[in-house]
Image (cartoon, rainbow, N blue to C red):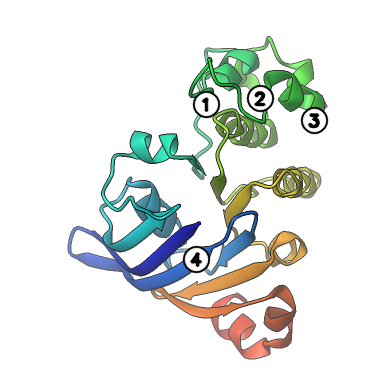
Amino acid sequence: MLEVKDLHAYYGKSHILQGVDMNIQAGEVVSLLGRNGVGRSTTVKAIMGEVTPHGTVRFKGKDIAGLPSYKIAHLGLGYVPEHRDIFPGLTVRQNLLLGIKNPRKPGRWKLDDMLEMFPNLKARADTAAGVLSGGEKQMLTTCRTLMGDPELIMIDEPTEGLAPLIVQQVGDLIARIAEAGVAILLVEQKLSIALRISHRLYVMGHGQIVFEGTPDQLKANEAVRKDWLEV
């Protein structure tokens, strides 16, 4: 479904991504792990067109490298950025409705589905989104992206800065998305969540992929965990 080959990206003269190769199949959950600053967020931004990509990025067989982000989104690729952008002056309900791409062609996710799945959002459906907690904002941004009915969703650092209980709820949300058949690329630092829900994992270091394998293979590879993940 998503194929990335020899992907490079730059911030000015800084060479951030240095030949990234990865792929995600339909319905697959894949995590991209690594320490801060190794290029994980830049990878998803380059795929989504927010950073200029140099290399091959194909989605459902179509070359999307360099397309505007809105065109990529309309092809069925969803993106939840790490900064949890919401419209603070709009209600939770209005924020969710903004995620719909085509009102005449309903997708698999409905507004009522989102509210029923997440009682916190339902209780605040008519409340201004700006007063939500960090965890609620994370759920809202993810659910708003789902309202656009993506076939693959990229979620960047969804548990960053959240309390342990909320981290568990966000992990459950990602698992529910996967159960609905949506492919997921999860950028995450918390190894426990990635190991729990992923089919495969990539570990990144210095702008390159340094490991690819299953959760069991990563658990068994102490050297990779020590060199590239542990603090």
Quarter occupied by residue 207? bottom left
**Res 132 label:** 2
Residue at x 63%, y 18% (from the top left corner)? 92
- Looking at the rendered image, the disc whose residue lies closer to the viewer, 1 or 4, is 4
Mark 1 vs mark 3, CA separation in Å: 19 Å
Q: Position of residue 149 (x, y in %)?
A: 58, 33
Q: Amino acid at mark 2?
A: Leu
Q: Residue beneath label 4, please?
A: 23
Q: Residues within 10 Å of mark 4 (few under 14, many from 20)?
A: some
**Res 176 label:** none
Q: Amino acid at mark 1?
A: Ile
Quarter occupied by residue 111? top right
Q: Residues within 10 Å of mark 1 (few under 14, many from 20)?
A: some
Q: Residue furthest top?
A: 126
- Looking at the rendered image, the disc whose residue lies closer to the viewer, 3 or 4, is 4
Does residue 146 lie above or below 91 as drawn? below
Question: In the structure shown, which secondary structural element does the residue marked by tag 1 occupy?
Answer: loop
Q: Amino acid at mark 3?
A: Met
Mark 2 vs mark 1, CA separation in Å: 10 Å
Q: Residues within 10 Å of mark 3 (few under 14, many from 20)?
A: few
Question: In the structure shown, which secondary structural element does the residue marked by tag 2 occupy?
Answer: loop
Q: Residue beneath label 1, please?
A: 86
- Looking at the rendered image, the disc whose residue lies closer to the viewer, 1 or 3, is 3
| Whether residue 160 is visible | no
- Nearer to the camera, 210 or 55: 55
- Nearer to the camera, 26 or 154: 26
Q: Residue beneath label 3, please?
A: 117
Whether label 2 touches label 1, CB < 8 Å:
yes
Mark earlier in primary sequence (2, 1): 1
Residue at x 70%, y 44% (from the top left corner)? 177
Residue at x 70%, y 82% (from the top left corner)? 217
